[in-house]
Image (cartoon, rainbow, N blue to C red):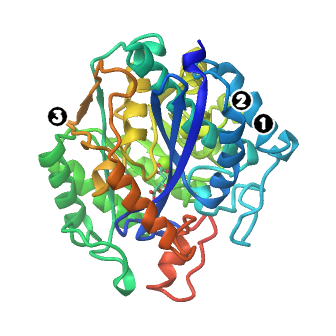
Amino acid sequence: MDRLAIAEVRLTPVLVADPPLLNTQGVHQPYAPRLIVEVVTRGGVTGLGETYGDTVYLDLARPLADALLGHTVTDLNALPALAARVCGDPSLSSPRRSSRGGPDAATGADAVDAAGLRGVQTADKLRLSVLSGFEVACLDAWGRATGLPVHALLGGKVRDRVAYSAYLFYRWAAHPAGRGESDDWGAALDPSGIVAQARRFADRHGFTSFKLKGGVFPPAQEIATIRALAAAFPGRPLRLDPNGAWSVPTSLQVAHELRDVLEYLEDPASGTARMAEVAAGTPLPLATNMCVTTFREIPEAFARGAVQVVLGDHHYWGGLRATRELAAVCRTFGIGLSLHSNTHLGISLAAMTHVAATLPDLDHACDTHYPWGTEDVLAERLVFRDGHLDVGDAPGLGVDLDRDRLAALHRRWLADDGTYRSRDDAAAMRLAEPGWVTPAVPRW
Ligand SMILES: O=C([O-])C(=O)C[C@H](O)[C@@H](O)C(=O)[O-]
Ligand SMILES: [Mg+2]
């Protein structure tokens, strides 16, 4: 066991190129912050983890890294209590104020900040997101030390490949003011642009289901885009996610108009109360990665029938094992399950794939931003075949770090003056539209 004790934890914040993808709050900044966690055992094995890299997460990660020294990588049930002790007083788990001085993201369904795209931001959720990077790194180290894949440490895989969905975004050709890296996707701001984007995703990665990030244009335009996708890809599962931008009547109208082509409607309205009202008025299933993002949000949402599919995310649910606990709760209440994604690198995609492989009732193809990325810290990028990732049996996560790439992305983080160290989609939007503020919801 001593060989599995943690001798060193390395934290490397990085900035990763991100395209100008639009959402209801603004546009992605040219660079997204991520944190790479390396856990080194006394036996000399290194495990990899990845999580959000915004400054508020880094502030919690540093004390947790120190506190982990001497613990063994198998000691995962003790992680949440350790994190609660060293990352701050659990009583701080009440809602947190927006770091941007705007409305408090957690006080109600009408207030969102960048974190609001993934539900309210609480101290609990921040801490769990940090913890998830360490949990994954410990599992990777444990697997590498014993020759077992992470899915085996989670009880074993029930499938050999995991289905992913194409994540379509309205987008500009380039970031405003000549910032960031360029790519060859071009702009997609209307139905034909999105259909072309979907074709490219399908041709390149074999995706057969499609999710459109909505809440960008008035609903009639987004309905037209979904209709164009349905015509171009008949019978394929489609999803639309305006991140809570619509009122209850608007949500009901969109649900009615698209009821024959949508697999589910994702977070049409903000907050459990509005989602419950929408759900009561449509047979279309509602999915969420906003109103059910923590265990404590489950009882009310499930009792009120507010959601029919939970889009789990191992980052903010607190790791791969917590994601399995979420799956058990969803199974108990007859609620569907899939997995959500934010801008991420290959370590998180590998982690997500391992846990997805162990979930018997994964009902829908998982989300991923990965195909939008052109940079990674992995020696070899993960490759989708027929819209799936294979679930390997190599030890740990089965992915290797490229130290030169990691160092280069870290140098970018070091060189940044703070502009990109915390995600701020509204700030990025202001470069194109001075005076832009995060729209209040309901926006339409
Ligand atoms: O499903 C979702 O809500 C997301 O993927 C949240 C993300 O933050 C997405 O809106 C984005 O990347 O702009
Ligand atoms: Mg969503």
Q: CA distance from mark 1 to mark 2?
A: 6 Å
Q: For the residues carrying marks 2 and 3, which lies nearer the camera in this image?
A: 2
Q: Quadrant of residue 163?
A: top left
Q: CA distance from mark 2 to mark 3?
A: 37 Å
The numbered mark, 2 or 3, whose residue comes first in the sequence reads 2
In the image, residue 17 above or below residue 130? below
Q: Would you name the residue on which mark 1 appears?
A: 84
Type of the residue with mark 2: Pro
Is the CB of the residue bearing disc 3 within 8 angstroms of ligand 1?
no
Disc 1 element:
helix
Type of the residue with mark 3: Asp
Residue at point 43%, 68% (across, down): 412
Q: Would you name the residue on which mark 3 appears?
A: 386
Q: Residue furthest left?
A: 203
In the image, residue 358 above or below residue 90? above
Type of the residue with mark 1: Ala
Residue at point 36%, 49% (across, down): 403
Residue at point 26%, 54% (across, down): 227
Disc 3 element:
loop
Is the CB of the residue bearing disc 1 within 8 angstroms of ligand 1?
no
Image quarter in which the C terminus is found: bottom right
From the viewer's side, name the closer residue of 39 and 355: 39
**Residue 359 appears in view:** no
Q: Which mark is residue 80?
A: 2
Whether pointer 1 and pointer 2 mark residues with C-beta atoms closer than 8 Å, the reply is yes
From the viewer's side, name the closer residue of 291 and 359: 359
> How far across and how far down the image is residue 1, in percent?
59, 12
Q: CA distance from mark 1 to mark 3?
A: 41 Å
The numbered mark, 1 or 3, whose residue comes first in the sequence reads 1
